[in-house]
């Protein structure tokens, strides 16, 4: 899948915003059935963005796009850890 830098930037910004919105709607620290549905969607978005970053791409990405992608992955890793921590502390 060959994406232009503008298309890839759109995917990064949309995916990161969507993941943060899913985390905010998940009621992580008050676990309900919806928490797991939002968590699954959150996991799928994060998996897609990790695939987008580490896929085989013959063209080199611009430096600014690599910085944005790596920054987004750091934010998404923190979001997924917070989600897991919130669900885990509910069962204590």
Image (cartoon, helix red, strand yellow):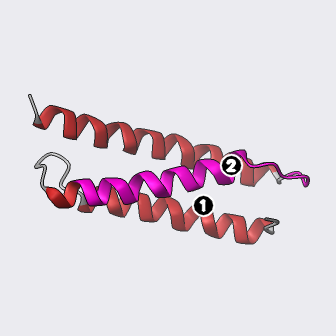
**Dividing the image into 4 quarters, which one contains the C terminus?**
top left
Q: Is residue 14 visible?
A: yes
Where is residue 88 drawn, in percent x and y?
Answer: 20, 33
Categorize mark 1 by other alpha carbons within 10 Å: few (<14), some (14-19), many (20+).
many
Q: Nearer the viewer, mark 1 or mark 2?
A: 2
- Magenta stretch: residue 43 in it? yes
Where is residue 63 drawn, in percent x and y?
Answer: 80, 48
**Dividing the image into 4 quarters, which one contains the N terminus?**
bottom right
Residue depicted at x 71% and y 45%? 54
Residue depicted at x 74% and y 70%? 6
Q: Which residue is mark 1?
A: 12
**Rendered image: mark on residue 53:** 2
The magenta stretch is 36-60
Helix, strand or loop for disc 2: helix
Left or right: 89 with respect to 77? left
- 3 in relation to 80, above or below: below
Left or right: 60 with respect to 8? right
- 15 in relation to 76, above or below: below
- Foreground residue, 74 or 51? 51
The image quarter in which residue 85 lies = top left
């Amino acid at each position: 899948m060959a994406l232009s830098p503008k298309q890839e930037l759109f995917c990064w910004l949309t995916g990161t915003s969507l993941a943060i919105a899913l985390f905010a709607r998940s009621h992580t620290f008050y676990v309900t059935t919806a928490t797991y549905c939002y968590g699954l969607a959150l996991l799928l978005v994060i998996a897609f963005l990790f695939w987008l970053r580490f896929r085989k791409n013959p063209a080199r990405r611009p430096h600014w796009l690599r910085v944005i992608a790596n920054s987004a992955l750091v934010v998404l890793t923190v979001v997924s850890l917070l989600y897991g921590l919130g669900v885990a502390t509910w069962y204590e």
